[in-house]
């Protein structure tokens, strides 16, 4: 097997990257759920974290902002502009959170205060980080609602979340995340509860805003169709560890890992609601009780005996391209093989 072991190449921060995640591990109440995750985001880049529910991708995103639940233990480094967020004092981290780095969560209605007008909620975010008057914050809030293409921003300012549709609430959440001009936006399954048409509109909005503002985005999703619409690169996570990382164009053309191959096969069946049962047997392995050897081998249609005995390292094949598979060279998976 050629390529370079991740032990050296993926432990070092990438020069010029806005965010460097290296050796990230997360345990909750003593149970290891994320193991040795590594990736980076460059300024203005959109990177997708792709994997099934329970794979560890949301825990990875929450780790960046120190939002893990009680009982969590975190290892590794998460460097934002050269500063390790994992060891940063809590007071300083609160300054970074919401201003330099912000997050959009899965359920917008659950994240918004149901009792307050949305304009007040955006204003409060602005004034928590900046010394501006209520009037100045309200003006900015209205401008932000206009930027996310909400009709009649003044009326929306006065509305409570229950008076808005799910898609409108998500646009409000995007406006709130942009309120203090962050450099990095983490979007955790931002279209999960939305229908396909609204979902497509939200993805187009995120892509436009990211390009206009030169905003770096970490997009967390189980849906390869969503990832492929907006991302420059993708990091595929299975059972708590990275199994494949590549540009989105390369992954769609040549899915080097059997799991990426299965995700692509499922997405070609239905881009909106991919069903892995069309490509894989069984259910996703749990990081809390991973199988021996390659964690994907019980579901892999290409597994051989060695796959059950040997845990593969993450090989670096080229700059930005890594794969964790003992057989990736001989398999030579590509997009044509998906439909074979």
Image (spheres, rainbow, N blue to C red):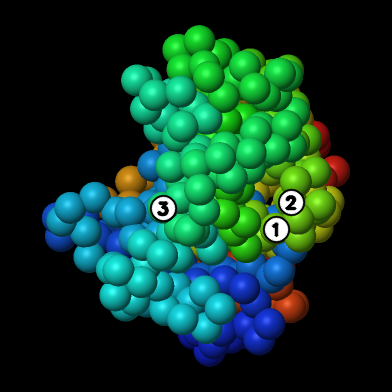
Q: Quadrant of residue 257?
A: bottom right
Residue at (41% x, 65% y) in the render: 95
For label 2, the crowd category at 10 Å Cα-Cα, with few meaning under 14, some 14 to 19 and many 20 or more, is many
Pick whichever of labels 1 and 3 is earlier in the sequence. 3
Kindly identify which numbered label has been placed on residue 128. 3
Residue at (50% x, 10% y) in the render: 163
Res 188 seen here: no
Q: Quadrant of the N terminus?
A: bottom right
Kindly identify which numbered label has been placed on residue 135. none
State the SS at label 1: loop
Label 2, on which residue? 210
Q: Is residue 279 left or right of residue 99?
A: right
State the SS at label 2: helix
As displayed, is residue 136 above or below residue 321?
above
Q: CA distance from mark 3 to mark 2?
A: 24 Å
As displayed, is residue 328 above or below residue 336?
below
- Observer-side mark, 3 or 2, equals 3
Residue 269 lies, in percent from the top left, at 72, 24
Residue 169 lies, in percent from the top left, at 55, 24
Residue at (67% x, 24% y) in the render: 153
Which is more toward the observer, 252 or 66?
66
Q: Are marks 2 and 1 in contact (CB under 8 Å)?
A: yes
Q: Quadrant of residue 35?
A: bottom left
Which is more toward the observer, 219 or 121?
121
Q: Is residue 165 left or right of residue 331?
A: left
Kindly identify which numbered label has been placed on residue 215. 1
Pick whichever of labels 2 and 1 is earlier in the sequence. 2
Res 88 seen here: yes
């Amino acid at each position: 097997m050629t390529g370079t072991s991740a032990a050296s190449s993926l432990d070092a921060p990438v020069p010029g990257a806005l965010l460097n995640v290296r050796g990230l591990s997360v345990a909750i109440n003593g149970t290891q759920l994320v193991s040795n995750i590594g990736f980076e985001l460059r300024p203005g880049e959109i990177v997708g974290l792709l994997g099934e529910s329970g794979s560890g991708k949301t825990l990875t995103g929450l780790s960046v902002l120190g939002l893990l639940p009680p009982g969590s233990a975190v290892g590794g480094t998460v460097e934002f502009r050269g500063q390790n967020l994992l060891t940063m004092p809590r007071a300083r981290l609160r300054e970074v959170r919401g201003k330099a780095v912000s997050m959009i969560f899965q359920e917008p209605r659950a994240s918004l205060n149901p009792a307050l007008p949305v304009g007040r909620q955006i204003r409060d975010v602005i004034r928590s980080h900046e010394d501006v008057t209520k009037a100045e914050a309200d003006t900015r809030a209205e401008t932000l609602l206009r930027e996310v293409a909400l009709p009649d921003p003044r009326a929306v300012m006065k509305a409570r979340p229950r008076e808005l549709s799910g898609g409108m609430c998500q646009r409000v959440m995007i406006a709130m995340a942009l309120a203090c001009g962050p450099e990095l936006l983490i979007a955790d399954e931002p279209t999960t509860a939305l229908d396909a048409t609204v979902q497509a509109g939200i993805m187009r909005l995120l892509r436009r805003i990211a390009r206009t503002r030169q905003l770096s985005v970490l997009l967390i999703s189980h849906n390869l169709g969503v990832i492929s619409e907006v991302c420059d690169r993708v990091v595929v996570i299975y059972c708590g560890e990275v199994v494949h990382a590549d540009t989105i164009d390369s992954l769609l053309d040549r899915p080097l890992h059997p799991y990426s191959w299965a995700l692509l096969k499922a997405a070609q069946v239905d881009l909106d609601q991919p069903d892995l049962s069309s490509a894989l047997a069984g259910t996703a392995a749990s990081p809390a009780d991973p199988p021996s050897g390659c964690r994907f081998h019980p579901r892999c249609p290409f597994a051989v005996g060695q796959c059950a005995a040997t845990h593969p390292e993450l090989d670096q094949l080229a700059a930005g391209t890594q794969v964790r598979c003992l057989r990736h060279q001989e398999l030579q998976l590509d997009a044509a093989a998906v439909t074979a």
